[in-house]
Image (spheres, rainbow, N blue to C red):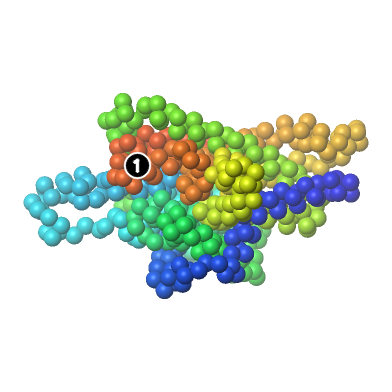
Amino acid sequence: MASSIIFLPLVLAIALIVASPILVVVSGVWHDGAGELWQHLLSTVFADYVLNSLWLFLGVGAGVLGVGTAAAWLVTACAFPGRRLWEWLLILPLAAPSYILAYVYTELLEYYGPVQTQGRQWFGWSSVNDYWFPPIRSLGGAIAMFVLVLYPYVYLLARTAFLEQSTCTLEASRSLGCTPWRSFFRVALPLARPNIIAGCALALMETLNDYGTVQFFGVDTFTVGIYRTWFGFDERPAAVKLAAILTLGALLLIALEQWSRRQAKFYQKGGRCRTLSRHRLGGWRGYGATIFCGLLVLLGFGVPVAELLYLCFQNAVTNFGEDFWRLSWHSFSLAVLSALLGMVLAMVLAYGQRLSGTWGVALSVRIAAMGYAIPGAVIAVGIMQPLGYVDQVLGTATGGQLLLSGSILALIFAYTVRFLAVSLGTVEASLTKIKPDLDEAARSLGHPIGSILIRIHAPLMTGGMLSASLLLFVDVMKELPATIVMRPFNFETLAVRVYEYAADERLAEAAAPALAILLVGMVPVILLSWQLGRSRATEVEKIS
């Protein structure tokens, strides 16, 4: 009881502080100070924001569901050339931010790019009137970029679900006359639905958060509208209203997904029994599966890396100058500080939930983790709004100097709100593996709660803590929307510099920072691939 009394106020305070930007934004729905600009937005571009966001949402959702689920089933249940290699290579596109792919493919596929230029030379075309080429800067191009980099979310969770399914269930369906593909549609796919939907939800959250890709492609979404209204028109109340509508839409979609499977059950009786005999794909089917997996890796990872490497070596002297290392230090320091803060807060929240076990603490923890479902631009609006008021109040004492708005502390707070769920989920998974008996034994020896957390749990959770810090570190390195809105004056990061260079059509100069972001993103992807392979090998050993 004493532990609950100690940790309950602390957890509630952290949850309230972390969730405060979201609450500020949601309250903006009923704000009446938007003025004439809000009415102008409603009568002109608001419908475009809604329709473009909706089509983007539907297109990316359908794309990642189809591509990710198909790839997961192929490498899990089928045998074809290169299957073992594709198991981990298919995760690599997760390391590439969508806005980097947008810049690279624009450089390759635009009218002045090498693809169309070479086509005109081969076929004798003189202008665009002689041929048709799909426009890359379009809604369809944006959907393609998101699908190429976000399908690994569905692939990873779907593959995990397929690996955990009972072999006896699948073999029973085959004994009743189902072909392997019919077993997939009738048995495996329905059982894996929670994982697949969860992966799709993660991909769609990243889509709603994006600013660089949709802005570069000229697709007016809510995120673009928020940024344009705030900085282009300097109309904060209208930007808050747009952010509030986007936030409510995201929360509504999450609630609808939960409601859609409220009565569905996904229990499975028994374990895997033994390894599932894979269906061998021979002839053109096997080569088709290999080509399918190869294209996903090539388009989502191989082509961007090759193009960026080429541009980097072509302009090595200018790309890796003093400015590059200064931006790298900015990004690195922000990512390290945010990762440390996120890990500490995740430890406190997870341990407080473990100690109390009350619904109030559990609800507070879930509220604190809600930021990952909210776009970064929305979080930035929710932070800048109250900080602006505080700076106005303090302005008389500081001579009009801004103390909080546009500071590094405010930016780190935005990262914490946005990505706390990433570290919290990893820490919670590690903490649940520690038996409560250790807590009781330590308390019987006179150790206080803080000592138990630091001297017992922390050493046992080293792997989970490092994973949580690493994931948060990489997410901060890639984050663009909140950084653009909240970065201090004359303080830029690698992501911001890539965006600025690409907006000015200077991809050769953006190659080095873009490649640095991509290579840093490969670290957790490789670690994840290694962990999946090790867990899979351990499972096979236990079965055999």
Residue 411 in picture, x, y percent from top left: 56, 43
Residue 32 locus on image (x, y percent): 57, 70
Q: Is residue 357 left or right of residue 38?
A: right
Q: Which residue: 66% across, 58% down?
A: 269
- Front residue of 71 and 278: 71
Q: Is residue 385 above or below residue 446?
A: below
Looking at this view, is 467 or 31 the one in front? Answer: 31
Residue to which mark 1 is pinned: 501
Query: Where does the image place residue 273, in percent across and percent down from the top left?
Result: 62, 50
Judged left or right of residue 431, residue 522 is left
Determine the secondary structure under disc 1: helix
Where residue 249 sits in the image (x, y, percent)?
54, 66
Q: Residue pushed farthest bottom?
A: 43
Residue at (48%, 37%) from the top-left corner?
491
Looking at the rendered structure, the number of numbered marks drawn on it comes to 1
Please state which amino acid type lies under the numbered disc 1: Tyr
- Quadrant where the C terminus lies? top right
Q: Is residue 260 left or right of residue 211?
A: right
Q: Nearer the viewer, residue 493 or 430?
A: 493
Whether residue 202 is visible here, answered yes or no, is no
Residue 398 visible at all: yes
Q: Residues within 10 Å of mark 1 (few under 14, many from 20)?
A: some
Q: Quadrant of residue 171?
A: bottom right
Residue depicted at x 21% and y 57%: 133
* Picture quadrant of residue 463: top right
**289 or 477: nearer the eye?**
477
Identify the residue shown where x is 40% and y is 48%.
99
